[in-house]
Amino acid sequence: MQQQRLTRKLPLPSSLVLMTALFGAPALADNAPSEVAAIYTGTVSSDRGLGFIGEQMTVAFRYNASVAPREGILGHSFPHAITSMSVTLGSESWTWVGGPNEAYLSNDEIYRQSLGGAIDRVSFWASDFSGPELTTEPAQDLNVEVYFSDLSPAGMPDALQDDMHLPRSAFDPRSFDNSSMSFSFSTFTAESTTYYYIGAVDLRLVSAVPEPSDYAMWLTGIGLLGAFARRVNG
């Protein structure tokens, strides 16, 4: 009898609203925001004597997943896909100030046909960062790259199924065989040029940062559930 009373209090339109709030998220996947954000962290394993070995390197960036691909020899590049990026080493941070950048995807089907191997490759790269100096000579050509590779043979479940489109969610390093990040720069004097490379390995996806529209959708769903609970208990 109690179940019959609850059924009368919940007319069909309200039932449909509740079902949409609970199960509508997968249907919204195709309408996900085109700007994707992610934060990766890894342990510094090489630094050319700069004193960061064992420290954490963190790279946070956003990219525009709607950028059209440009075909290359072994895959597709996505010029100017990155919209923001920062890198942190220990207590020091640098911010990308809008220089050249691109994303690059290479599917193992293309690579296998070209070079006789099987490897998926993913790269996010940006140049021109502003931040503290690490050497006595001013640094130039500051570059940051986040790199993933997967050695699983083509046709097997692997990390990169499509190199024609940037994904609408951040890549998970656990889906790849190898992952790394690098922060590099050069210094110049009248006598010589010195190249510095700081590398981190074994990356972790700290956060696939939700977009404001995601928060709005979650809050709407919570509000609908609250209204439904009040109606049932009323």
Image: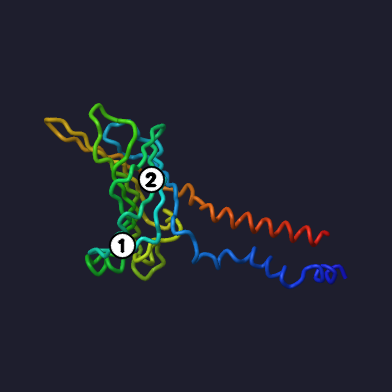
* Residue 228, image quadrant: bottom right
Asked whether disc 1 touches disc 2, contact meaning CB atoms under 8 Å apart, the reply is: no
Q: Is residue 230 left or right of residue 170?
A: right
Report x, y in % for residue 79. Answer: 30, 56
Q: Residue at x 42, y 45 (%)?
A: 60
How was this image coloured? rainbow
Front label number (1 vs 2):
2
Which disc number belongs to residue 106?
1
- Comes first in the chain, label 1 or label 2: 2
How crowded pointer 1 is (Cα within 10 Å; few <14, some 14-19, many 20+) is rated as many
Along the viewing direction, whichever of 67 and 202 lies nearer the viewer: 67
Quarter occupied by the C terminus: bottom right
Residue 130 position within the rendered picture, expressed as x and y whole percent measured from the top left: 33, 37
Give above or below for 228 relative to 96. below
Q: Which residue is mark 2?
A: 85
Which residue is pictured at 35% across the width and 63% down the height?
152
Q: Position of residue 45 (x, y in %)?
A: 34, 40
Image side of residue 211 versus residue 182, left or right = right
Between the C-alphas of marks 1 and 2, the distance is 22 Å
> Of helix, strand and loop, which one carries label 2?
strand
Q: Quadrant of residue 59?
A: top left
Which residue corresponds to the image point at 59% horizontal and 58% vertical from the top-left?
217
The residue lying toward the viewer, choosing from 99 and 104, is 99
Determine the image quadrant of residue 10.
bottom right
Side of 213 relative to 89 (left or right): right
Three-letter amino acid code of the residue under disc 2: Met
